[in-house]
Amino acid sequence: MKTITTTDDLAAFCAKAQQHDYVTVDTEFLRERTYYSKLCLVQLAVPGKEDDSAVLVDPLAGEGLSLEPLYELFRDPSVVKVFHAARQDLEIFQVEAGVIPAPLFDTQVAAMVCGFGEQAGYETLVKKIAKQSLDKSSRFTDWSRRPLTDAQKTYALADVTHLRGIYEFLARKLASSGRDKWVEEELRVLTDPETYRTEPSEAWQRIKTRNTSPRFLALLRELARFREDYAQSRNVPRSRVYKDDALVELAATKPQSVQDLGRSRLLLREARKGEIAEGILAAVRAGLECPQENLPVPDKSADRQQVNPALADLLRVLLKAKSETYGVAAKLIASAADLDAMAGGTRDVAALRGWRRDVFGHDALRLCEGEIALAVKGSAVEPVEI
């Protein structure tokens, strides 16, 4: 099991990888104690059975290792970069170097398109496609500690060696079914740098609350903005600043002083003093002083939407039938929110665009318009003309 610790060795392996059609990639990282993921290990494999066809790259081995040869490989348009469930891996490379590997192939997305169910795990694909089993005993180890054990290295390499056969199987299956374009469409979100950019001013929209008062939302926005700025600048988890439930409590109680912060039920002790306390109080003032015209406007479209429950149920039946017909995970075709939105008259939903429209959306619209009905034929449900 070769571990690369120098830039020259990494450059040599990446040059070798550029002679192949694809390279499989995985990472090990830590994020429990930081805002941004800490890259601890990169695993790479190229086609072949030789011992040197798969390597570990150790970015923590010393100060002399530059990952630039890897990033050059990621930029090479002639080599497909194969990941499984790539989103967190891609975020690391985008944040670290502003690089997103291209062309990209995500075996989790491909597996859903090929009928392996919703969010098929790597272990499942290894069993079903590679006919192998994985030793998961090192799954939750601390990847930042050195030296790595042989068990850790074996576990890490298995994440890219089995991936070669899985990729080749899925790529052939997609090519024969003509669904490779479906996967390309799905990967556009993963390859968009905006996917990995978190704007502090938008952070409040991720917080769940039932209070839609514009002034409350302004307080929520400013408190979330401060937390995001603070967490990013110091590279600490959001929850180490204050958790979502504490943020909502602060927006509701509107503390005006350090003494008010001391009465909070949910605020961490560290947040009741110093820079965090000052930031909270400044954010509350900003929310209270926000001009009326700049207050957030709550999205009440869902409240106004009159969902036809019977139609929503029919759409669910149609979705299940289409999922079985095409062998594609139902959740990949349409979400429950998509179905409810369509049953309420909304047409701007993902299920009505791209390949989803061909598979499901076209008939779903016709069902909504009363142009088709659903009939049971043996054990199957099929659309019928009215």
Image: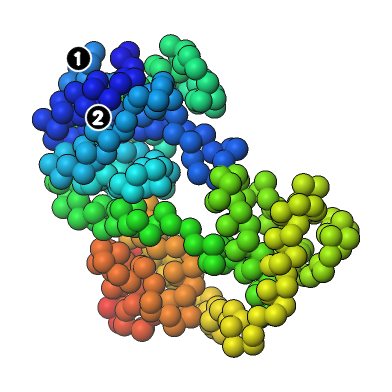
Q: Mark 2 points at which residue?
A: 164
Q: In this view, does 152 lie above or below 298?
A: above
Measuring from the top left, give residue 236's x and y in whole percent. Answer: 60, 44
- Quarter placement of the C terminus: bottom left
Q: Name the residue under label 1.
A: 50
Measuring from the top left, give residue 41's x and y in whole percent. Answer: 40, 27
Q: Is residue 269 left or right of residue 181?
A: right
Location of residue 281 (image quadrant): bottom right
**Front disc: 1 or 2:** 1
One can see residue 241 in this view: yes
Distance from Cα at disc 1 to Cα at disc 2: 13 Å
Q: Which residue is drawn at 43% across and 57% down?
A: 197
Measuring from the top left, give residue 266's x and y in whole percent. Answer: 80, 54
One can see residue 376 in this view: no
Q: Residue at x 55, y 51 (%)?
A: 232
- Quarter placement of the N terminus: top left
Q: Is residue 366 above or below residue 155?
A: below
Q: Which of marks 1 and 2 is nearer the N terminus?
A: 1
Q: Is residue 248 left or right of residue 315?
A: right
Q: Is residue 124 above or below residue 270?
A: above
- Residue 305 bears which disc, if any? none
- Is disc 2 placed on a helix, strand or loop? helix
Mark 2: amino acid: Arg
